[in-house]
Image: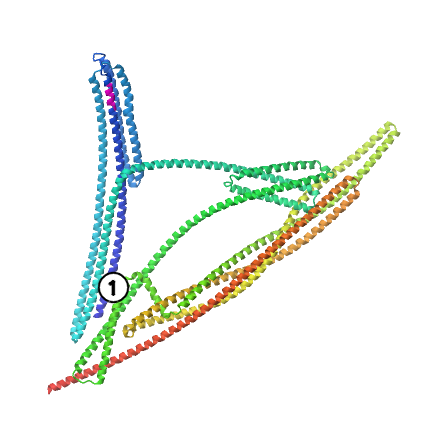
Amino acid sequence: MEQDFRERLMSLRCQSVEESEVLLRQVELERHILMEELQLLRVKDTELQEELSNITQEKVRLEEELDAVNVKLRDAESSVIRLQGDLKQLLQDKFGSLDPTGTYLSHEQKFSTIIKEYELQCRELQDRNDELSSELDLLKIQRSSRRSERSAGNDVSASELSWSLQHIESESDDSDMKQSSSPAVRKRLQPVDKIALSSLDDISVPAVSIQTELAVEQLKEKHQQEVQQLNIQLETQINYYERQLDMMKQSMEVERKDISQAFKLEISELEEQKSRAEQQVKQLKGTVDKLQTQIQQGAGGGARSMEQERKMHRERAELEQNFAREISNLVQRLSDEKEQLEAELKLKMDQEVMRVREESRLLHAQVQQQQHTHAQHLLHQLQEQLRLSREEKKRVEEELRQLKEQVCGLQELLRRCSQSEATLEEDLKASQRRSLELEENNTYLESPEVLNKRLFSERISMEEELQDGMRREEELQAQVDQLKMEPGDLSASLRSELEKLQEVLKRLTAEVKSLKADRARLIQDLKDQAMAVDGLQLQLTSVSKEVDRRRSSEATLQEDLKQKQNRISQLWSSLTEEREVVTRLSQENSTYTCLLDQLSTQIMEMEEEISSLHEQLKGLSSQLNDTADLVLDLRRQLNSKTSELDWLRADIAGRVSSETQNTELDRVREQVLLLQQALQDSQNQLRTTEEIFDREKRKMAQQLMELERLVLDLEDVMEPDAPHRTQLEEVRLENGALQERLRVLQQEVQNLDDEVAKKRRRLEEMEREHERSRKEEERLQKENFKYREEVLDLSSRNLQLSSDNGDLSAHLCEEQESVQMLQKHLATVSKEQPEEGATFQVQRLMEEKLQQQSVWLQQQEARLKEQQLLEKELISCKEKLSCQSQLEAELRSVMGKLLKVEEEKDLLQRDAKEQNHKVNSLQEEVERLQSELLVITQEKVSHAQEVLELYSKLSEAENQVVQLEANFQKLLKKEELHQELQETQEQASITLQEQIHRMKVQNQELQQQVSKLQVQEVQVQKLTQELHTLKSRLMDVEAALTQAQDQAVRADTALSVAKAQHLRQVQQLQQQAGCGEQVEVLQAQLEAEMKRSQQLEEVAKLQVQQSGSQIIMKQQFDKATVALQQRVEELEAQLKALRLVLQEKINQLKEQLVKNNRTSEMMKDLYVENSQLMKALQVTELRQKEAEKKNLLFEEKVRVLNQLLREAVATVLAT
């Protein structure tokens, strides 16, 4: 029965908890509903505020209309007063000159005209009134449209429009009234006054006064009617707006009543829930009474003593008190929550009502203030807007003007730049032509190598100038906006340079023309041409200086452009920073959204954990039930023991008991005391468990912390002792130092990777250049062979021509001698023979001579044609030789590059070897670390398994300990020690958890390092492969170099052969030369050859200088290699330090393993102690069983004694 009763109590408690949760949920729902209603009320308040502001605006507008009407009335009154004054003046002026007997009819006609004019004025006034009425209708229509606009939310614009319309209308009305009243009347009265002054002689006083008074009265009546109409309209509008305000107030009161009724309904629902809970409590009390009656009925059948019944009553009373206390606590808590909710609702309602009242009061005050300030504010705003609009318009116009000016300036700059570019291109073309002509002129003076070098260098310079010009054109087109002041100076310098170049071109053209004209006299004018060539060389040097100066100016311009580009880049960087800020803000928004999602997931997890905690609470309640059952069992045992003691005391009273019985009684008493203590402990435990239950109920928000504490408690059992905290802190510090060292090493490794990547790029570029040079070498070799063959052919043909020329000169000499002989012969013949025969012979000789000369001239023409052809072929050959010189220069540059490549190859090979050594050492270290990591991971796995086993064993031990504490709390009297142990265990568990977390982090870092080392190994393998490929390519380059050197040797031999042939030709010419002119020509050729030799010496000097610069470059490269070697040594030292650090780390891990072994040994000791405790518990259980057996024996003995006593009593009674 008691178990049923407890179960019902637990079910009632669960129901009460569920009901409280349901009530909390309902309260939360109601709160949400109330908040929504409050939001709706706030929205309505805002709408009402907007309506009030609109009403105030309408009121202000109506007041302004009233003011305008008052102004109109004042104008009308002033005009009436002015008319009356005019009439009085007329009457005073013409009163004495009236003649009643005069021309009465003419005066009547005049007055009739005046009356007609007044009638016209009245009609005009009537028309004006009609216009005013139409304007009033328009105002009404506008008011209705404003109301519709006000509902759409365009309050300010409508008010401004109405104000502006009113202002315009008032101004127009004022102006019209003034025009209609004062100026029109005056204009119309002027002729009338003039007529009256001229013709009113015999007018009657009463007739004039009556007519004017009638007109004035009519005007007054009309004005009064208009004023009354306007007042009526204003009153109607005011009444309408007052009605709207009353309606709004009524709606507000209705809404307040609805809200109060809703709150009252909610309060009544809460009261109904309270009454239901009270009814449930009453039902529970009835079930308790039924259970009590059942217990009493069941107890009436048995034979129990009075003390047992008293104890049962006490227990029942205590249980009833506890139950009543719990029920009262629940009811009180529910009532408190209800009262709190009601108080909160009342406070909220009062606050809302006060806030609404305060807002309405403030609105009224604001309306009153706005009535005074709104018009001025609107005027000020309109004036400010007009001023701002004008200023904005001016600013926009100024900006447009500036932009137009900038566009015009830019167009002018572009035009000038295009012109300068065109002139530059023309100059470049002209300089190219000039260089070609100079090449043609210098063919006879310079050797092929020097000429080719010069032409090649000039061509390269011109091409570079062309490229620079193109680049400048692009840069100028891109940076025209930033070079506003510089194009003027640049254009002036360009113009001056262009003029100089044009002058030089004119000179060159003149020289070219002279060369063309004197081509037949090339041999005679070699000296002049040499001098011209010298002048041209001087001009070329001047042109080159000008080009250098232009380059310097271009460099300055490029620097300015770079500065401006830097500014642009800074602006772009600022823009990119702003974009990055925008992206960062978007990322932050995305992170906030992610955080919201995470929070939602965390809330779901918390709800799940709350449900799990509910289940844990249910488990605790079941444990409480079990403890209550144990308490009942103990109470039953106590009751049985007490009954047995009472029986023993009653039976043994008056008898002398033996020592054994006394000892047994003492034992029983001790057992009873122990049982009583156990009862007290169990009761205390019950109370503590109930308090813990209440605390856990109250602390639902701290469930995660409690779970973490439980986990920490479970882990603390694994390591109860905490003597290793200092060691853990040292390990932590060492881990931090190791992490910093690892970061430094990682940075150094990254730097090495960057250097390796740079070297790889350089190698790739060198490989590309090597391939290009190899292809160019092949092409140049082919072209060189062709050109040399052609040069040899041309030289052989030149020798033939020179021999032909010698033959011709000899033939000419012979013919001259023959002509001289013939002349002598003719002279002798003319002396000897008569004149006829002489003339005939002379004619015959002349004809033969002419034939010979014609033949000789034909031969000369053919030879000249052949010579021209040969000259053309020589020009083409020279062009080819210039190309050959370019190719040779390219070959030289390629050779220099190949030398650099070989040097860099050697350095890279050294670096590769050193890096291979490093990689091998790192691989060894990585393998060693991997092996150590494997060992550590295995040990970790084994430790984890041991921890799991210990955890399972600990859970079993804890269950056993809980049972032992429930059954035998006498062994755990020292609660303070137990608490201290728990605290130490918690601390030890926290430290152990932190240590485990750190170990995990360290393992992860080591794994990351291992992965990075593996990546470095792959990179080193790639570098080794690239080095092998480079070696193969360098071998190919060396082979190509040997081939190029062989070809150069061949070219030298060919040149020596050509020089020898040239010397032979010179000797032949000296032998054949019979004239002084040919000797001078040869001397000029010799001088040219000397110049060529000097130039060759200069070229050799330049090559020596280049070799010196190459040596300097090599020294610099050696220094760079030494620096790299030092860097490598530093890296090796750092790697050694890293190895030492890793070795220290491994030692620390080993020490940590030793410590873990110690902790495992301590755990084993704890298990041994637990097993000893279990054995002690088993011994105590055996002793308890023995005591129970002895009690049974005592009971049997008591029964036997009772039977003996009964029998003895029966025998005594029988006797």
Q: In the picture shown, does residue 663 fall above or below 1149?
A: below
- At label 1, the amino acid type is Cys
Which secondary structure class fits the magenta region best?
A: helix
How is the model colour-coded?
rainbow
- The residue depicted at 20 percent of the width and 54 percent of the height is 268
Q: Residue furthest toward the bottom?
A: 1215
Residue 833 on image: x %, y %:
88, 29
The answer, for residue 790, to whether it is visible in the render is no
Q: In the picture shown, does residue 1155 fall above or below 800?
A: below
Q: Mark 1 points at which residue?
A: 14
- The residue depicted at 33 percent of the width and 59 percent of the height is 604
Q: Could you tell whether 715 is left or right of 842 in the image?
A: left
**Element on which disc 1 rests:** helix
Residue 478 on image: x %, y %:
51, 42
Front residue of 1191/1134: it is: 1134
Residue 1063 on image: x %, y %:
75, 46
Q: Could you tell whether 638 is left or right of 807 in the image?
A: left
Front residue of 1104/325: it is: 1104
Residue 1172 on image: x %, y %:
34, 77
Magenta segment, which residues? 82-90
Residue 735 image-quadrant placement: bottom left
Q: For the C terminus, which image quadrant?
A: bottom left
Q: Residue furthest toward the right?
A: 832
Q: In the picture shown, does residue 355 fall above or below 130?
A: below
Magenta-drawn stretch contains 347 = no
The answer, for residue 560, to whether it is visible in the render is yes
